Image (cartoon, helix red, strand yellow):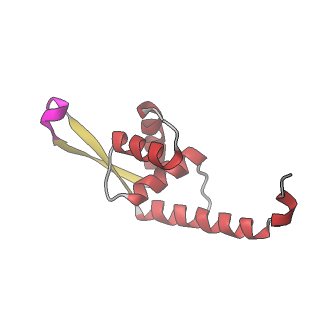
Amino acid sequence: MNLQLGVLEEMILIILLMKDETYGVDIAKEYESQLNQTISLPAIHVVLKRLEKKDLVTSKMGEPTAERGGRRKRIYQATNKGYEAAKYLQQKRSEMWKVIPAMNFVFQ
């Protein structure tokens, strides 16, 4: 599999895989919960657009809600290709970590 994903792309893809469907604000909350870091909504949307171009994510417009003044949310979902990409990257990382000798990194 020839796939290039940045760390942020991978993290957001994994968050999408954790949920059935979700939207930007929910992704930001989950990102902060999992990584103890904040992320801006514009950053999330840039990444989601890149993931969508790579066919790793799909999106659709949700129903209008009163809490949003009648505006609709864009709902995102990981695709099968997104799942396979994340799984492949996880497998490669695991293989690489097995080669790292733990004793080389004992800190004083």
Q: Name the residue located 87 percent from the left edge and 61 percent from the top edge.
A: 104
Horizontal side of 106 relative to 89 (left or right) equals: right
Residue 64: name its quadrant: top left
Horizontal side of 32 relative to 89 (left or right) equals: left
Q: Name the residue located 36 percent from the left edge and 52 percent from the top edge.
A: 58
Which residue occupies the foreground of this view, 103 or 43? 103
Residue 40: name its quadrant: top left
Give the total of numbered labels: 0
Q: Answer yes or no: is residue 107 visible.
A: yes
Extent of the magenta region? 64-70
Work out whether 1 lies above or below 15.
below
Q: Name the residue located 41 percent from the left edge and 53 percent from the top edge.
A: 57
Residue lying furthest top in this view?
69
Residue lying furthest front in this view?
108
Q: Answer yes or no: is residue 53 visible.
A: no
Residue 48: name its quadrant: top left
Q: Judge whether residue 82 is colored magenta.
A: no
Work out whether 104 lies above or below 8.
below
Work out whether 92 lies above or below 22.
below
Q: Quadrant of the N terminus?
A: bottom right
Q: Name the residue located 83 percent from the left edge and 53 percent from the top edge.
A: 107
Which residue occupies the foreground of this view, 74 or 36? 36
What percent of the width, then of the height, locates residue 3? 60, 57
What percent of the width, then of the height, locates residue 39? 48, 35
Horizontal side of 95 relative to 21 (left or right) equals: right
